[in-house]
Image: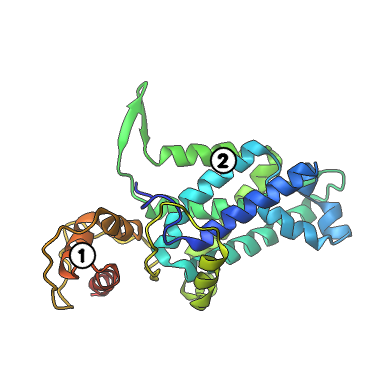
Amino acid sequence: MNGGPSGFTNAPVTRSFVIASALFTIFFGIQGRSIKLGLSYQDVIVKLRIWKLVTSVFAFSSTPELMFGLFLLYYFRVFERQIGSNKYSVFILFSIITSLLFEVLAISLLKDPAANLVTSGPYGLLFASFVPFFFDIPVSTRFRVFGVRFSDKSFIYLAGLQLLLSSWRRSILPGICGILAGSLYRLNVFGIRKAKFPEFVSSFFSRFSLPSAGNPPAAPTRNVRGNMPSFVGRQVERSHPPVPTATEPPENSIATLVSMGFDRNSARQALVHAGNDVNIATNMLLESQSH
């Protein structure tokens, strides 16, 4: 399992969401209002407090939830690199809106005016991301601890389980709603997986976000197919004339292509034929996928 290059390289939308979530949580935490951000029947059905729907998307209700939540958001940036910032923005919007609709439906059915039934935080997005994580991210390492089998994906599942059980029913409910939202996205209801925002969206987030120190310049994001492709054992087709190169492809260029879901050997081959140009190599890999 490879999250790709460190930092938020090629993931400006994720970076903006992480920053927004951290700032909202700190702001309401300083005011002592974090615990009051959870959704209840009184808020959503009776008084129609729309502002709570908005703030509950970003702000976590406690510091431990913030730590696990930001860790998962940071890891799931691999999906933005895989499908591109414009499609990933649609995934975020779809996951949040759909999970909120499920939460409101659950709150209206449970009808408990005395309790906050749903804790705050981007649970919809986080647990929607576990659907492609389960299906599309391969296991790269397996090991045993006291006779119990684990994989490198186990740590992500454990972090998600900790977050899911952090507030018991109040966190389990939005977690389930997020998984349902992610499942609907994967089933491509209304052709949602083909939708994408215009190019200026990723450009806006690239300018809006704080710079990530030490990151190499981000290559333009490409819209790779939703399922992570496997290129093991396949040769890159020479649809472009090979450009000779006297140097081994840079490791950060290979890592950039691997983070998009391409096999390492195919990524290296493509860079060799493309003269170490990441954009040309990406096009070659995408065209080889379509054949």
| Label 1 element class | helix
Across and down, in percent, residue 123 comes to 62, 50
Which residue is depicted at the point 68% across and 46% down?
A: 60
Task: Compare residues 130 and 211 and report the one nearer the observer.
Answer: 211
Which residue is depicted at the point 63% across and 40% down?
A: 65
Q: Is residue 169 visible?
A: yes
Using the numbered discs, state the Cα–Cα distance from disc 2 to disc 1 in whole angstroms. 36 Å
Which residue is depicted at the point 23% across and 71% down?
A: 288
Mark identifier at residue 271:
1
Instruction: Please rate how many residues cluster around mark 2, counting C-alpha atoms within 10 Å: few if below 14, some from 14 to 19, many from 20.
Output: some
| Label 2 element class | helix
Task: Compare residues 113 and 194 and report the one nearer the observer.
Answer: 194
Across and down, in percent, residue 207 comes to 53, 67
Task: Compare residues 69 and 199 and report the one nearer the observer.
Answer: 199
Q: Amino acid at mark 1?
A: Leu
Across and down, in percent, residue 242 comes to 13, 74
Which residue is depicted at the point 86% across and 53% down?
A: 42
Residue occupied by mark 2: 68
Mark identifier at residue 2:
none
Q: Is residue 105 visible?
A: no
- Residue 246 sits in quarter: bottom left
- Total labels: the figure holds 2
Q: Amino acid at mark 2?
A: Phe
